[in-house]
Image: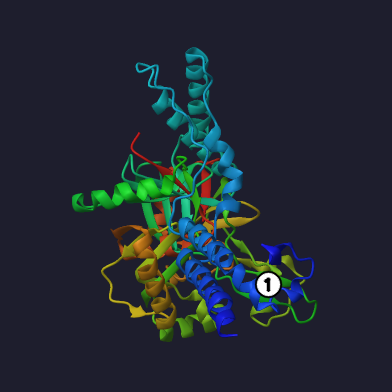
Amino acid sequence: MIGLQSEHPSTFFNSPQVFFKTRWLFLLLYSLLFCATLSTCGKKESEQTIAPDQSDKKWDRQRAELEYGLIQAELKLALSEELYMVLDFERKELRLKLKGATVWNYPLNIAEADSQELREFIQRFQGDGGRWVRFLSEKHLFASQEKTPDSILAIVSEVVKADVELLQRDVPSRFQLLWGYGLILEVRTDIKGIPKSRLKSTIVEVREALRRPFGEARIILKMDPGDALTLYRAAHPGLPTLLYPHL
Amino acid sequence: MKRRFWYIIVPSVLLVGFVVVRMMITGGKSSLNQMGMFSDSLLVQLPEDKELAQKELERARKAFAKIKPSKPYIVIDTHANTIFLRTEDSILIKATCSTGSGGELIDSVTGRRWVFNTPRGVFKVTNKLTDPWWRKPDWAFIEDNESIPTDPSQRLDPEMLGEYALGFGNDYYIHGTIYERLLGVSVTHGCVRVGSEELKKLYDRVTIGTPVYIF
């Protein structure tokens, strides 16, 4: 304790006697820091919770509050000219919307066996405070196939005077959308793709393996290649995502 | 020295290592800041009074219904080069199209610059044309290394746009093409090309004022 009160920290470690008197304090400090860091890992963030009014069962206030919150959240998203995604578990659909209008949709066909995974996904998405909007933090393409062969596009690019890269579209064979907090939507198609950036894919796989002990929720969705192409290209980091649970 | 190593350096390295691993696990990002703008919506609550709450919910439902198009609307998917006429729940017409290449053209003489993107956002069909003629803009001549004509009639091309055209936005069109083999590839200068058969169906069903959503 003497060391901590010293006004000359530079002399603190020069006195081994004083230092070893405080070693337990250091160990305690490190333990506390370690525990604090550990406690935030994989934990769903806490928020202020909305206290549901249980008193009026007929009016079903809880359901009304939920619907109202979802409408307000979507109205805010629809104010912008930007695209947003809706994970609609009520209608079992994945949607891309613009100004409130559906511009793309795909059925969320989740097998019964994966219903536990689905519940976990919804719970993690909501966090402790019943959150309905999250932002896509990352997307990763594992494998894809070129939509049009480069040889053909080379001829087209001569005619239209545009780079082949601009004209090319990668049809995904497998990709992931991630929202952080262990939330993963994995999309797979029937096409046999060529692996993209093996190093980055390995890093993503290792990161997920490290994260798994802290909990994750992964939904795997089988998709038509054309729809997967649209979703992969349209879903950019920062894309707002709204979750509609079962009302 | 040895004790300092065990009590100071080793725990410090472990702690830093742990933080790095944690960052790897969480992706080193947090969406909490972005969530700030939506945190309020979570706290939105209906009034305590039941009647007021019901009225407020009804008002919100009406506001929500208002933002959705009540009639069929056009959607242009620039990623997959597909055009749809659809409603909220069903697709009425689906066709392969071609959208802007994203290419760039700079006029070496004047320094003027064009980027050939199809605009994204929400628009409305402003006009419907049959047998449209294309009035070639300056970039069409610059691109082909031709001199820009002074006679306006030399700019006119009766073939290029096909049989129908639907105008939207700032002088953009959904129109036909003589290059149908290129449909599905992003090769245009910003307009949306559709095959003649599907364009006819689209033209027949679309009215002026139909919303056009492009993403």
**Residue for point 35% across, 64% down:** A212
Q: Residue at coordinates 47% horizontally, 40% vertically from top-left? A: A129
Q: Is residue B65 among what the camera can see?
A: yes
For residue B180, say whether it is visible.
no
State the residue at coordinates (53%, 79%): B6
Relative to A124, is B5 above or below?
Answer: below
Q: Splitting the image into 4 quarters, where does residue A88 fall?
A: top left
> In the figure, residue B96 lies in which quadrant?
bottom left
Depth check: give the residue in front, B119 or B175: B119
Residue placed most toward the observer, B204 or A227: A227
Which of the two residues, B13 or B144, is positioned nearer the viewer here? B13
Q: In which quarter of the image is the N terminus of chain B?
A: bottom right
Quadrant location of residue A75? top right
Relative to B108, residue B126 above or below = above
Seen in the picture, residue B196 relative to A132 is either above or below; the reply is below
The residue to which callout 1 is attached is B139
